[in-house]
Amino acid sequence: MENKKLPYRLFFISILACIAGVVATGTAALLIRLIGLLLNLLFHGRYAWTYVEAYVAHLSWWSYLIPVLGAALAGILIKYGSVQIKGHGIPEAMEAVLYRESRIPLRVALLKPLSAAITIGSGGPFGAEGPIIQTGGAVGSLVGQVIPVSAQERKILLACGAAAGTVAIFNTTIAAVFLTTELLLFEFSAISLIPVIIASATAYFFRGLVFGADPAFLVPTAHIGMESFPWLIVFGVIAGLSAAALTKTLYFFEDLMEAIPKLDNMTRPIFGAVLFAPLAVLEPRILGVGYGNIKEILFGNLPLSTLLSLFFFKGLGWLVALGSGTSGGVLAPLFIISGSLGGILGHFLYPFTHIPGGIVALLMMAAMFGAGTHARLSAAIFAAELTRDFQMLVPLILVTAVAEAVALRLLPYSIMTGKLVRRGVQVPNKFICVLEKSPDACLADGEEHKIRAGD
């Protein structure tokens, strides 16, 4: 790409970014509505598109067979539709960026949200975020395949769609830019960031028409003073250790499931759901995404017994179900697991910490998210923007940085990149281009690059 053409291409890609943002937002809204429809039909026995929690319904014994049925349908889609729809969603989008010139097939764009809606709508303990990010990325990728663009520009459009999907589900416009940049673009450059910012802003305004402009979660405000500084370090260390342990355990379950003979991509998710269902009998709150759980954890409304139950059963149920290779996301379960851990710590340590349990839960959510994904800055901004409590931003940055430092010491890969690294895929740890003259000059060799003026 010649330097004199950059402004024109940037303007053109920005227009396409608007289109990708609108379509990705609509797709995300449709997925959430479809999940709501299935949850209403299967667990509440009524026809409605509004999102509800599965566990608030009066559940009969046969209700716990619904996740098994959903896993069976997802397994059929994986085996006979596309194997790319299995898993978290974000690693698959990363692989498309790194090794397939950001090309995501139309089949994946259609089947990924359908499989995710089935598994989550049938009570699977997954988040909708990963599938929405992959689907939004697929929308951006398809725009870049229908309209002739370069591989670099297609990567930008994929990130635009993924960012728009993130905004649509969480209403975190700023964090979406950082998250997709850290996880998908692997670079900070004007030609990449401007379209992603435009797509995220577009998604923000269109999201307001569908879901409203309120933050995803509101929390009571709290001031964290100097007396709490040592506790932030302690929470960061605990979060880093927990994130590394959770990541290792997830891939342990994946290896364990794949080692079982006579199980394939279709039957393995069924087996995982059969193991998950008894856990849901013991703790029905682990069914579905669990946004209601996150709200109650942040407000400090749950008793210690419920926090302990959520931490153990949601963690184990999610690890077993996702380790079986079905389709589902990681962020919402990670928030519930880490938030429950934070609530437990807050219960035992308050008032020594001078930090309420709900705020400790918020700190642990951000810290384990950042340590688990290796997206430390995104996680801190994400938590602050998710709750609109921006006075918490500095404590969030501190605790997240400490957590990632600990996690990196124990584990070189993240919960997102582990699947790729374990298959021998080279994933850049640092990929930053500054004031580029030629985007193609950026190389993913793990070092920081500055494009020379003469390039």
Image (tube, rainbow, N blue to C red):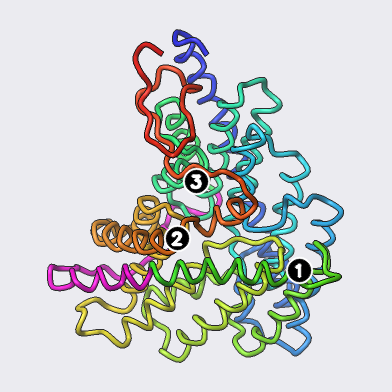
Q: Earlier in the sequence, mark 2 or mark 3?
A: 3
Location of residue 97 with respect to 61 vertically, above or below: above
The residues tagged by marks 2 and 1 sit, at their Cα atoms, a distance apart of: 30 Å
Q: Residue at x 55, y 52 (%)?
A: 417
Q: Residue at x 70, y 67 (%)?
A: 121
Q: Quadrant of the C terminus?
A: top left
Identify the residue under disc 2. 216
Q: Secondary structure at mark 3?
A: helix
Location of residue 139 with respect to 212 vertically, above or below: above
Q: Secondary structure at mark 2?
A: loop
Q: Left or right: 28 with respect to 428?
A: right
Q: Position of residue 119 (x, y in %)?
A: 71, 66
Q: Considering depth in this image, is 12 or 83 the residue closer to the camera?
A: 83
Q: Quadrant of residue 368?
A: bottom left
The residues tagged by marks 1 and 3 sit, at their Cα atoms, a distance apart of: 26 Å
What amino acid type is highlighted by mark number 3? Leu
Question: Pointer 2: residues within 10 angstroms few (<14), some, or many (20+)?
Answer: some
What amino acid type is highlighted by mark number 1? Pro
Question: Pointer 3: residues within 10 angstroms few (<14), some, or many (20+)?
Answer: many
Q: Is residue 131 visible?
A: no
Give the magenta-colored segment's residue range: 210-239
Identify the residue under disc 3. 183
Q: Left or right: 267 with respect to 278?
A: right
Question: Pointer 1: residues within 10 angstroms few (<14), some, or many (20+)?
Answer: many
What amino acid type is highlighted by mark number 2? Ala
Q: Is residue 161 visible?
A: yes
Q: Earlier in the sequence, mark 1 or mark 3?
A: 3
Q: Considering depth in this image, is 99 or 157 the residue closer to the camera?
A: 99
Q: Position of residue 233 (x, y in %)?
A: 25, 68
